[in-house]
Image (cartoon, rainbow, N blue to C red):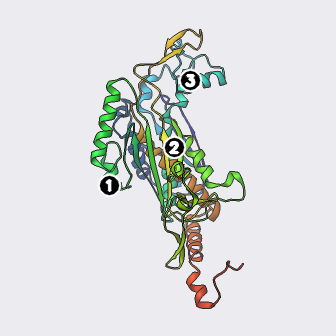
Amino acid sequence: MRFLTAGESHGPGLVALVDGVPAGLALSPAEIDVDLRRRQLGYGRGARQSIERDAVRITGGVRQGRTTGAPVALQIANRDAVNWERVMSVEPVPEPPDPVTRLRPGHADLAGALKFGHDDVRDVIERASARETAARVAAGAVAKALLRAVGTEVRSETRTIGEVSTMPTFDSEKVEASEVRCADPQTSARMVAAIAAAREAGDTLGGIVALRATGVVPGLGSFAEWDRRLDGRIAQALLSIQAAKGMQFADAFTAATERGSAVHDPITVREGHFSRTRNRAGGLEGGMTNGEDVLVDVAFKPISTLMKPLPSADLRTGAPSPAHVERSDVCVIPAAGVVAEAMLAFVLADALCEKFGNDDVADLVAAVERYRARLRPIDARRRGSTAPPGPRAAS
């Protein structure tokens, strides 16, 4: 599976094209819209979210409620586009809009303008904007539908906002009831207060999102080549999200300071299959899933657009100038969790199809069931032989 997105922040809308979705997968706009709405919520979001009411229109790859095996085409309209028709016009307009030339530290403004030779930063802002993540969330909802067919779920929870932290429980009901997507009410209140203080100061806050994927099929990914290792693929996907600056599997940075005897996960056998007594590997070993929950933290920097702008320079003249100010959020961590879910889900769905095929969802599910049955051979071997269980014989 793979996907591409297109569209600008204030253009007519966003597009996601999802290729490789197995045929026969039940899919409706309503289930995609649930995640699109979750992405728009959260304390600290800006005025844009009161304008947009994100909803997907499926224009290809689905018929009578099921995927056909063709690419799935998803469209999300930008309601705010009506206010930007002159600025974002495809055709030249008689009175061109004023260019944006004051550069914002932390944004793609300067690097993007230098790369493409733009003298109007608007050409960078519109595509680099995190508005693009709405299309990612729509694509991720398709991946989640496929993962659910094999019993895999991906969830997120806010771990940290500013200096306020908690230990995630992934209690979905409590998380979704919180303005900041944190299950603990007392910590949620402290996070809200931190965001409010940052807004009052004309500043912004970042934080950390925790992810957990449960029911993950073991053996996804590979150790054989560097670019097939699943932990690397997950890292690339998550760090591609706007404002993401770091990540770890489980408690990797703490583990880096400890001895191996305290870090590696002892192997045991439960009910005829291999298991672990702890999960400090975060569900991945040797570039592959090992059957435990996949645990990931993603760190997001504070939003770069500040209401009290930092010193900067003008793109055209080089003269000192305060950074450009554009409508923005104060804190996006609650929404970032939903985007991170989408990206993790898509990588897992891609790896699932890579191992089991992506022609027909019924074939894929049947293949996963056979595979899972093979992963529980210990009791059967013991019944057939008094010798210690060895490697599975070739069929």
Residue 211 numbered tag? none
Q: Is residue 147 visible?
A: yes
Structural distance between the alpha carbons of marks 3 and 2: 22 Å
Q: Position of residue 160 (x, y in %)?
A: 40, 42
Amino acid at the residue labelled 2: Arg
Check disc 1 and report the residue beneath it.
173
Q: Earlier in the sequence, mark 3 or mark 2?
A: 3
x and y percentages locating residue 300 in the rendered image = 48, 38
13 sits to left or right of 308:
right
| Mark-to-mark CA distance, 1 and 2 | 24 Å
Q: Residues within 10 Å of mark 3 (few under 14, many from 20)?
A: many
Query: In this orientation, which residue lies closer to the viewer: 86 or 3?
Result: 3
Mark 1 or mark 2: name the one nearer the start of the chain.
Answer: 2
Across the whole image, how many numbered discs are drawn on residues? Answer: 3
x, y percent for residue 50: 34, 33
Crowding near pointer 2: few (<14 within 10 Å), some, many (20+)?
Answer: many
Of the numbered discs 1 and 3, the one sitting upstream in the chain is 3
Say whether residue 353 is left or right of residue 33. Answer: right
> Residue at 43% across / 39% down in the picture?
207
Q: Secondary structure at mark 2?
A: helix
The amino acid sitting under disc 1 is Glu
For discs 3 and 2, the disc positioned in front in the rendered view:
3
Q: In this image, 214 relative to 381: left or right?
A: left
Circle 2 residue: 136
User: Looking at the picture, does residue 339 appear above or below residue 303?
Assistant: below
Q: Residue at x 34, y 50 (%)?
A: 175
Question: Residue drawn at (53%, 48%), measured in percent from left and top?
Answer: 253
> In this rendering, does residue 26 appear at all?
no
Assign the C terminus to one quadrant of the image: bottom right
Residue placed under numbered mark 3 in the picture: 109
Q: Amino acid at mark 3?
A: Asp
